[in-house]
Image (cartoon, grey):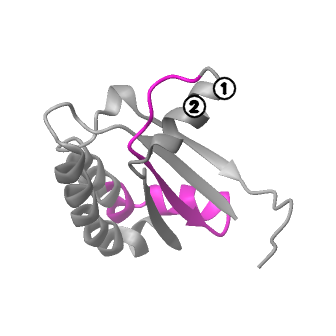
Amino acid sequence: MVKLVYIVRRRPDFTPQDFYRRWLAHGPLVREVATAIRARRYVQSHTVDTPLNAALAGSRGMGPAYDGITEVWWDRMEDLAEGLGTPEGRAGAQRLLDDEREFIDLAASYIFLTEEHEIFDLR
């Protein structure tokens, strides 16, 4: 599987609570365009407000926290390319980007593709 990882920061005009509420409202749009872009799974991970985050980051000399992570899965890289290669897929991706601009600080966020390598699963 191929996974898009999107590490997000909220726009400065959003409080954390308003940002998370708005980000959750983005979910149905992602579901709506999922078939067109051939996405298989979508998950939002919202950063938890806890002093542990600052302690963990500080112990590693890291900068300010991100507001969360979005993960989107495809079965194969070809599925992603094919989905974005259709007019419907391109239109869906544009709708997502237009909506993201309303609440995500795109210049302070980061997006990239990955392949998972499971090391262990103790479930």
Q: Is residue 39 visible?
A: no
Q: Is residue 74 above or below residue 70?
A: below
Indicate whether residue 52 is drawn in magenta.
no
Q: Could you say which disc has been placed on residue 100 in the image?
A: none
Determine which residue is flagged by label 1.
60
Q: Nearer the viewer, residue 27 or 62?
A: 62
Q: Could you say which disc has been placed on residue 57 in the image?
A: 2
Q: The disc labelled 1 sits on which kind of residue?
A: Arg
Location of residue 88 by image quarter: bottom left
Q: Is residue 87 left or right of residue 39?
A: left
Q: Nearer the viewer, residue 88 or 61?
A: 61
Residue at the spot 43% in from the left edge and 37% down from the top edge: 66
Q: Nearer the viewer, residue 88 or 52?
A: 52
Q: Is residue 4 left or right of residue 9?
A: right
Q: Quadrant of the C terminus?
A: bottom right
Q: Are marks 1 and 2 in contact (CB under 8 Å)?
A: yes
Q: In what element is the residue under mark 2? A: helix
Q: Quadrant of the N terminus?
A: bottom right
Q: Residues within 10 Å of mark 2 (few under 14, many from 20)?
A: few
* Magenta span of residues: 62-90
Q: The disc labelled 2 sits on which kind of residue?
A: Ala
Q: Is residue 53 visible?
A: yes
